[in-house]
Image: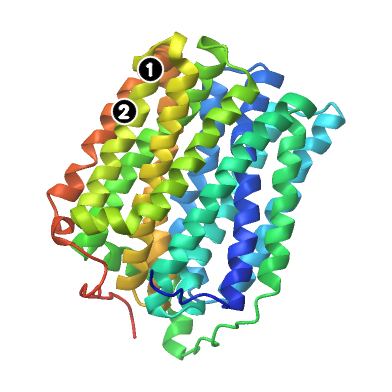
Amino acid sequence: MAESRLRGHSDFNKLWFGQTVSNFGDRISRIALPTIAIVDLHRGAFEVGVLALLGSLPFLLLGPVAGVWIDRVSRRTVLILTDLGRLVVLATVPLAYWLDVLSMTQLFVVAGLTAVMTVFFEVAYQAYLPSIVDKDAIMEGNQKLQISRSMATVGGAAAGGGLMQALGNAVAVLVDALSFLISLVSVMLIKHREPEREKTAEAERESVLSGMRDGFRTLLGDGRLRNLMLSTTLVNISTGVATPLVLLYAYQEAALTQAEVGVAFAAAGVGMIAGGLLAKKVAAVVAVSGSLALSIVLVSVAILLVPLSGVGLAWAALSVSQFLLGFAFSIYQIHVMTLVQTLVPVEMLGRVNGAALSVVWGMATFGGVFAGVLGSTLGSRSGLIVAGVTALAAVLFILLSPLRAVRDLEGQAPVKVHARA
């Protein structure tokens, strides 16, 4: 086995630790918020769909703006401020619950504000990693972060189910809030400081709109990045439809308990660990393009497995489905992030990531809307079938594009940057 390039890398390890804990808490809250809506506030498909909508709408509206801004300021500072903000916002949920004033309106506000801060965090985070590690260590950094995120998913989902069952759903959200405190401290302890960006007269005159244009032109001007964005977008729309419908199906049709759902969702973390460990080996056998295509097919199979298995096998089907989703997501994410961070210059990463996230995650906004519509009209089972078939179509953007020729992550021609000097 090749020697780790990041062993003893203090700053990376601090970032790694903070994100591991934060992901642990985030996984709990991801289940707890819709569970509070369904179980405690007795709401249905429409409200859960709106909750999902508000969690993704800021990516569509703010991604490009965040990208421009983050290329102009300290990315470390952005990470610190957004961790602090999410800590405060999420902490209001258990407080309101214990005061018996929690409402669906507050859940909507919390979901929206948390998503706004997550937009800025994600764009800054993806642009920050290549600035603290060497270029030849980016792949290893993404693998370590993905594997630890997977391990957090296992513990987070299982602990979330147990906490909700034993102590109530509000306690689960409190744990997520406190996880951002640990992430905040970890980032504050990072010693690396980014070089101060030169403020030329031309740069000062450059508008936000101009910076957004540069990000989109660079992203859309490269066939690899463009089709990667399109395939990921379609998959995200499908999973955006599937996620709330899976919870509705589990609680309302299959009558599973919070603990059973938590354990089933923990299987996603096991799959993510397996995917993280095997990502390079899979690519060595079927190439990077094959790994991306295989991942998309597995996402489709995972979504379809739940509605096609029947209520009697609901818990087993949900567990296997989550494992496959985790496995596929891990392989896909590692190669996507490394490819983008390798192809795009560090000084341009904020704008490109912001433009991509606005489409990739922003279009998942419609997933939440479609989930509400499909759940209310066709039912959760039929809605999941629609989502699974839609996900499968995304594989065409890999097989019928320049991505088909991408066999490895080394030796790739860099993107042509469309931006002012």
User: Is residue 4 or residue 408 the one in the foreground?
Assistant: 4
The tag on residue 388 is 2
The amino acid marked with disc number 2 is: Gly
Tell me the quadrant of the picture where the C terminus can be found. bottom left
Tell me the quadrant of the picture where the N terminus can be found.
bottom left
Q: Residues within 10 Å of mark 1 (few under 14, many from 20)?
A: many
Q: Secondary structure at mark 2?
A: helix
Q: Are marks 2 and 1 in contact (CB under 8 Å)?
A: yes
Write down the residue under mark 1.
307
Residue at the extreme right of the image, as rendered: 99
First along the sequence among labels 2 and 1? 1
In this picture, is 111 found above or below 184?
above
Which residue appears at 59% of the width and 23% of the height? 260
Secondary structure beneath disc 1? helix
Q: Quadrant of residue 10?
A: bottom right
Looking at the picture, how far across and down is residue 80, in whole percent?
Answer: 67, 66
Above/below status of 92 relative to 51: below
Q: Disc 1 marks which amino acid?
A: Pro
For the question of whether residue 41 can be seen, the reply is: no
Q: Which residue is drawn at the image coordinates 69% and 67% (left, top)? A: 186
Residue at left offset 38%, top offset 57%: 334
Residue 93 can be seen in this image: yes
Q: Where residue 188 sits: x, y (%)?
A: 70, 72
Distance between the Cα atoms at labels 2 and 1? 10 Å
